[in-house]
Amino acid sequence: MSDATDVFQPLQAADPSVVAGYRLAARLGAGGMGRVYLSHTPGGRPVAIKVVRPELADDPDFRRRFGREIRAAQRVRGAYTAELIDADADGVPPWLATLYVPGPSLSEAVARRGPLSVPAVLWLMAGMAEALEAIHAEGIVHRDLKPSNVLLAADGPRVIDFGIALAVDGTSYTATGHTIGTPAYMAPEQASGAEVTAATDVFALAQTAAFAALGRPLYGDGAGVDVLYRIVHSGPELSLLPEPLRPLFARILAADPAERATPGEIVEWCRQRLGADADAGGAPAVWREISGPEVVVPPPVPDPTPAQPQPLIGWLPPTRQEPKARGGRGGRRLVAAVGLTGVALLVSALTWWVMDGKGQRDQQDKTGSSASATGSSEQPSDSARESSADSADSADSAGSSGSSDSGDSPDSAALGADEPGPGTSPSSPASPQEPTPEPYPLVMLDTKNSVNLKDPDAQVKGRTGDIRFACQSIGCQLESDTSVFLQLYGKPGGTLEECRRLLKEGKNHRLPLAGAANGSEICVKGASGDIGLFVITTKSTAMPDIAFLQGELTIWRDAA
């Protein structure tokens, strides 16, 4: 843990920048279920965000099991578990968030420092056993306890990913021969397809602790099927373990689940062997030695702040807004006087507007003055605002004197270009209207055609369109020479404002589709300023030669 670059990897082009409101700061790694990222809660606490892989996300049975398991996992509270704080089984794709543990995994620590000492193994087993007690109390079986699922913080181990293997089990992905769990850390009943119980986790605890003591799996390395055969048909070689640990391992590695010790019995056995160190709280020194120096966690990623136009009401020129103080009270009186002048100006303007509005409309109908075409639709320039402020002292009476034939009269100067003057409409200036969405419900992309944002219905034969779909043996992606892409993560329902904000600094002309699934939403910005939201309805990429992508596209013209 001495180098942050070993832990926190920069986000790549295929990675999302936001997942369900969590802004991602770095990539932490990848596992059997998906990719893991660093983010933060609104209060700044680090969390690990795990995003489910598309082939699992596309399976409705997985989503159902995943939802059930995360609801159970959210009830688990233990000193040696990484708390699950947020999740969404119906997200596109599904995801979950756990508290981030600033420490290496057990597998990383052993690879870096070698096997653990006997006292460290005892502390490790006690911590894992206590974690299993909390997990089993909620009716959850971990099913995949192993060194990479045990993180070593400065104050002890943390067991992660409890119950998630059950959600993965039984999906179409696993039905193709993929073994659930990790062979070297399975119990005999799990390897042979028999019933999995809490005792199965106890066997995995022993194998995980044996790895910590030996620096390698107890049942050896090699092909998974060979390891599983040895677990089912051979007893463990206890002679490989340090002598003080053998009696406990002999019991918790029993082939019959009913003969194994419970997590509570493991905790008590370890405390007895640790003796005075257990009562004196000697664990922290052990964990600090194992985990090494703590890495500084990257700070939260700030939300992009869109520029907001300054309102006219309450505006004062810089020279009058912050006058220099002259002799204390005199300076404050000057500030107050300027503020009162601004209030008087505003009141005069509103009074004139209300009382003379009808006369202005009548005059506009008669004269067809061009002032309404220019004065009410454009933002006032700095010079116009300064002119209105400079003339405020002499315009109090003029502001309520009625209509005038000239748009350059003191009335219009005092009100500013945003306020209605003679011959203008009395209505307040309307904010610019958002572009009207144009729906294209069926957009088809394959490796032989492309699509232009100008007319998505007219498919382009060949690879010259704004959006192209490409598939190779390493994966499929969207490509463009001029348009940029960004995939949205979290709950469905992307909007123009969301795409506009996230694409503001977008530069990716390639979007790998490994993290996309049916229902995924992709923002597109064209060179002409058009913005599109493409929602995948069918993704078929298993065979690159005949792969295709189908979806619904909504376009907002000149929206960037």
Image (cartoon, rainbow, N blue to C red):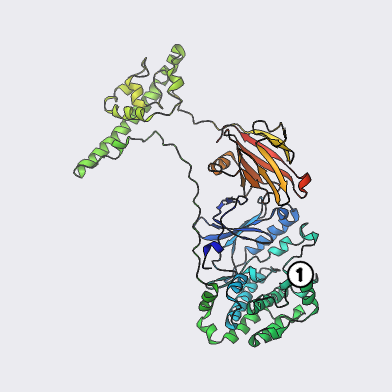
Task: Name the amino acid type tagged 1.
Answer: Gly
Image: 149 above or below 286: above
* Residue 158: image location, x then y, percent: 59, 70
Q: Name the residue under label 1.
A: 224
Q: Residue at x 52, y 72 (%)?
A: 292
Q: Residue at x 71, y 64 (%)?
A: 165
* Residue 120: image location, x then y, percent: 58, 80
* Residue 456: image location, x then y, percent: 68, 33
Q: Quadrant of the C terminus?
A: top right
Task: Find residue 395 and report its image quarter.
Answer: top left
* Residue 320: image location, x then y, percent: 29, 36
Q: In this image, 45 relative to 14: left or right? A: left
Crowding near the residue tagged with mark 1, few <14, some 14–19, many ≥20 C-alpha atoms within 10 Å: few
Q: From this viewpoint, is residue 189 visible?
A: no
Q: In what element is the residue under mark 1?
A: helix
Nearer-the-camera pick, 331 or 526: 526
Task: Find residue 161 and report its image quarter.
Answer: bottom right
Nearer-the-camera pick, 435 or 292: 292
Q: In this image, 84 relative to 309: left or right? A: right
Image: 330 above or below 237: above
Nearer-the-camera pick, 490 or 423: 490
Nearer-the-camera pick, 18 or 313: 18
Q: From this viewpoint, is residue 498 visible?
A: yes
Image: 408 above or below 320: above
